[in-house]
Image (cartoon, grey):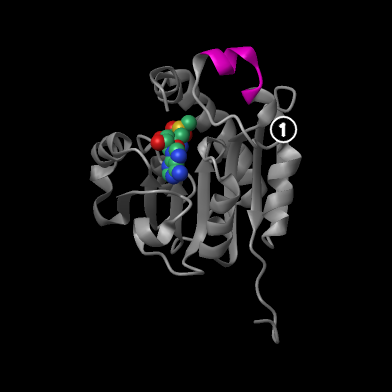
Amino acid sequence: MNRAETWLVNSPPRRWLQRVYEVPVLLRMGGRLLPCTRVLEIGCGSGYGSQLILERFGAATVDAVDLDPVMIGRAARRLARYGDRVRLAQGSATDLRTALDVDDDSYGAVFDFGIVHHIPDWREAITEVGRVLTPGGRFYFEEVTSHALARSTYRRLFDHPTDDRFSAEQFLDELVHHGLVVLGSLTRVQGDYLLGVAAKPVRTGGER
Ligand SMILES: C[S@@+](CC[C@H](N)C(=O)[O-])C[C@H]1O[C@@H](n2cnc3c(N)ncnc32)[C@H](O)[C@@H]1O
């Protein structure tokens, strides 16, 4: 993330949007978490999303991973007050075994506040989300689509991978490809932004 984007994602208007608009939309689509729910946040940045996950979604604990050690340092300072309810790790959302030593079916919910579009091999991140969710677990996502990334303002100001970015439809298709069921989704600003929730189905008798 370059300096302009670091400033933007941590700015008061973005935090306000996340708190006042995105959280209520995601809660409407996916519901509040059960009090015992263990959560993973991928690409936690400076930790504001993890704070919302604990305070507004009612997570018991949050494991949060980010590629950038500077962001992990910021998140550690912000989230210190939650003690051992938060575990932070530097590493990639595409390899959670290395970052957090995570087994399959580990988390009741995974959150993505605008990170998957940063990952060159973004499908690998979706594979990991599907792997680490427990059956019945939910994936809450807020994403930036190829439509936004193609805009000249985005290209001038920010630094994103340019190849193989996803439209809203392609992102949702990838979730389905990994066996997730989309509970709700919507796009905003002419398809630039995607918000939604998907669930990993509960296995029925006889399935392996
Ligand atoms: C646009 S910021 C969003 C940060 C935070 N989720 C928020 O909403 O403020 C994207 C974040 O993804 C992180 N990131 C990029 N690639 C990643 C990867 N492969 N695995 C984990 N984090 C990654 C960046 O370091 C950055 O903190």
Please tell me whether residue 154 belongs to the stretch shown in magenta: yes
| Residue 11 x, y percent position in the rendering | 42, 20
Residue 89 visible in image = yes
In depth, the one of 206 and 84 nearer the eye is 206
Task: Check if residue 125 falls in the magenta segment.
Answer: no
Q: Is residue 147 above or below residue 53?
A: above
Extent of the magenta region: 149-156
Count the marks: how many?
1
> In what element is the residue under mark 1?
strand
Rendered residue at 64%/82% (across/down) = 208
Which residue is drawn at the image coordinates 65% and 72% (left, top)? Answer: 202
Q: Which residue is mark 1?
A: 187
Name the amino acid type tagged 1: Thr
* Residue 130 at x, y percent in the picture: 58, 60
Residue 155 horizontal side relative to residue 150, left or right: left
Q: Is residue 189 above or below residue 30?
A: above
> Looking at the image, which residue is at 50% across and 20% down?
158
Q: Quadrant of the N terminus?
A: top left
Whether the residue carrying mark 1 lies under 8 Å from ligand 1 is answered with no
Q: Name the quadrant where ligand 1 sits.
A: top left
Where is residue 101? Give x, y as percent.
Answer: 36, 64
Q: Is residue 136 left or right of residue 95?
A: right
At a point 56% along the width and 52% down the height, the residue shown is 124
Main SS, magenta residues: helix
Instruction: Mark yes or no: residue 49 visible.
Output: no
* Relative height, residue 46 to residue 111 (above, below): above
